[in-house]
Image: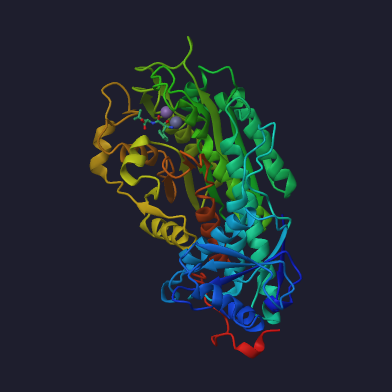
């Protein structure tokens, strides 16, 4: 779909659909009020009849509104004006886009983007409208022989900004929104692809494509090179599969100073997790194709960052393989030596994510990183702890944890800070090796993070357990692309710091005064 930025009056739009907001208790937004006046109260009449009460997320499509040039006017409920914040704005945009796909309108102009959300500027309004629209329109129908007819994708969406002088900021917001949206689409596509298509080598090819498209560097290592590095923990997981393991390394040299310490993102890339010899129960096992969502979101965030050409040095590291049972598969009780030299007793072959990540974390040391963030669908226990709402966040540096929490908060992709206390490390004791790969049922997400922390001592490190947030089950089954928005915001904040800018938390409007009526054109 094509996006556009425009300033101009709603009654003058010669288009299939104009979308305007309506608050609860019959309060019209500026654009809705303009349409109401030109149509001699047509809109307020409809509202008085009770068909549109302004409830957040409700929509009503009107045809032939007098004295307008558009075919339809869509009223979009915004909820109570006093409570209209970022979250409500996103919800209203989402509802308007969903409703638009239920009409046959192929072009629309949305006036929701010219509303005011406290502490946010025009650039942010447009960026978020773009991201939410792309997210709402996403479909994965590559394997359907017939396209789903129940919803159509509009051809063109124009987002309104309050005044002509806002067009440049709007354009910037649009470019940022498109980059984030493209990164999220990549993450969702990779996540949703079945395991027989999205294999480790497929993932490596996709990684290389991202680097090639935006002038980044890609290095792909195969089993031989991985063995030469001494990554025997990683390779122990890959052993039982006929698919070869890959280590994907992508680099973006965006900083002015090429020798600036990079931010390293590490993603768990298990393209299918059967559990291995510690086989998982059959029910719902198909969902373990999503066990590479850490990798997918790292590639998605990397793609967004390079498309925006953020002035940072960024490295993405993705260890990827399948976890399968076989005659030559790793067995419970086996002891493996990690790249760090630490030995691991594999008590459960289903705790494989940490076995591939620990070697990737050791590998990260060679980049002399400013910060390392790993992303993994690591534990079922994290789903029990935080459900599908918050990503589990662990860090060996509280200030880094605070940065990530704030970034997630900013873009509605929230994480929750979990403890990484020494007392939990006890649970990983092994009588035969330096550590066991599981710590028992209590605090399962925490002991998994504790395991990783033993390989991340050389730098500031954070771990995001996305087992509950990376994909949705049920009716709307599919990858969510979380935490791409959080990661991109985190990187953007780091770029702002590098440029000496104040971090635009809540990004306030530059001009303080509200939009005056006569400034509309
Ligand atoms: N990929 C799974 C974690 C997972 C489970 C993610 C369910 C999303 C939904 C991971 O490899 C795993 O199997 N973890 C085990 C660890 C256990 C054996 C200590 C788990 O969570 O059960
Ligand atoms: Mn597993
Ligand atoms: Zn797994």
**Residue lying farthest front?**
49
Quadrant position of residue 8: bottom right
Q: Which residue sits at x=62%, y=71%? A: 111
Q: How many marks?
A: 0
> In the image, residue 381 lies at what x, y percent?
33, 37
Camera-side residue: 450 or 324? 324
Residue drawn 34% across and 46% down?
Answer: 386
On the image, the x and y values in percent for residue 193 come to 60, 33
Report if residue 257 is visible in the image. Answer: no
Q: Quarter of the picture for ligand 3?
A: top left
Quadrant hosting residue 178: bottom right
User: Can the viewer see residue 250?
Assistant: yes
Q: Nearer the viewer, residue 318 or 12?
A: 12
Q: Determine the residue located farthest toward the top in the rendered image.
A: 327
Q: Quadrant of the N terminus?
A: bottom right
Residue 271 drawn at (x, y percent):
54, 30
Rendering coords of residue 210 (x, y %): 69, 44
In this view, the residue in front, 119 or 157, is 157
Rendered position, 6 above or below 462: below
Q: Is residue 93 above or below residue 233?
A: below
Q: Quadrant of the C terminus?
A: bottom right
Q: Note whether 19 is above or below 486 in the view shown.
A: below
Rendering colour mode: rainbow
């Amino acid at each position: 779909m094509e996006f556009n930025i425009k300033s101009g009056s709603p009654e003058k739009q010669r288009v299939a659909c104009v979308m305007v907001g309506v608050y609860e208790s019959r309060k019209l937004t500026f654009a809705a009020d303009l349409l109401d006046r030109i149509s001699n109260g047509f809109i307020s009449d409809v509202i008085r009849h009770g068909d549109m009460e302004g409830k957040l997320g409700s929509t009503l499509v009107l045809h032939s509104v007098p004295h307008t040039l558009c075919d339809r006017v869509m009223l979009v409920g915004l909820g109570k004006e006093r409570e209209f914040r970022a979250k409500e704005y996103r919800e209203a945009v989402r509802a308007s886009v969903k409703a638009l796909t239920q009409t046959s309108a192929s072009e629309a102009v949305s006036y929701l983007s010219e509303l005011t959300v406290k502490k946010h500027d025009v650039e942010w309004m447009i960026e978020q409208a773009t991201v939410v629209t792309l997210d709402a329109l996403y479909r994965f129908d590559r394997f359907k022989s017939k396209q789903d007819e129940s919803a159509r994708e509009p051809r063109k969406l124009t987002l309104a900004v309050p005044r002509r002088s806002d067009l440049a900021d709007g354009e910037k917001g649009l470019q940022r929104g498109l980059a984030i949206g493209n990164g999220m689409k990549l993450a969702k596509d990779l996540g949703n692809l079945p395991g027989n298509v999205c294999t480790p080598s497929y993932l490596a090819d996709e990684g290389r494509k991202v680097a090639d498209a935006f002038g980044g560097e890609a290095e792909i290592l195969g089993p031989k090179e991985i063995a030469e590095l001494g990554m025997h923990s990683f390779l122990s997981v890959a052993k039982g599969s006929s698919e070869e393991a890959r280590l994907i390394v992508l680099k973006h040299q965006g900083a002015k100073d090429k020798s600036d310490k990079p931010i390293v993102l590490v993603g768990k890339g298990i393209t299918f997790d059967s559990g291995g010899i510690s086989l998982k129960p059959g029910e719902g096992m198909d969902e373990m194709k999503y066990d590479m969502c850490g990798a997918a979101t790292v590639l998605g965030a990397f793609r967004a960052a390079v498309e925006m050409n953020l002035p940072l040095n960024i490295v993405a590291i993705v260890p990827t393989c399948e976890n399968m049972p076989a005659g030559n598969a790793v067995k419970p009780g086996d002891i493996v030596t990690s790249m760090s030299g630490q030995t691991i007793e594999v008590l459960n072959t289903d705790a494989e994510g940490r076995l591939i990540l620990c070697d990737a974390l050791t590998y990260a040391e060679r980049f002399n990183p400013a910060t390392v963030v790993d992303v993994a669908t690591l534990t079922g226990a994290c789903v029990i702890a935080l459900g599908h709402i918050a990503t589990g966040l662990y860090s060996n540096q509280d200030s880094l944890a605070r940065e990530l929490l704030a970034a997630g908060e900013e873009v509605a992709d929230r994480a929750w800070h979990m403890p990484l206390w020494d007392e939990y490390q006890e649970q990983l004791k092994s009588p035969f090796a330096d550590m066991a790969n599981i710590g028992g049922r209590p605090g399962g997400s925490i002991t998994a993070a504790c395991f990783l922390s033993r390989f991340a001592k050389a730098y500031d490190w954070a771990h995001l357990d996305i087992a509950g947030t990376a994909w949705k089950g049920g009716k709307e089954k599919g990858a969510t692309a979380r935490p791409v928005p959080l990661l991109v915001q985190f990187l953007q904040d780091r770029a702002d710091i590098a440029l000496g800018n104040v971090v635009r938390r809540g990004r306030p409007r530059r001009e303080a005064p509200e939009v005056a009526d006569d400034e509309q054109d």
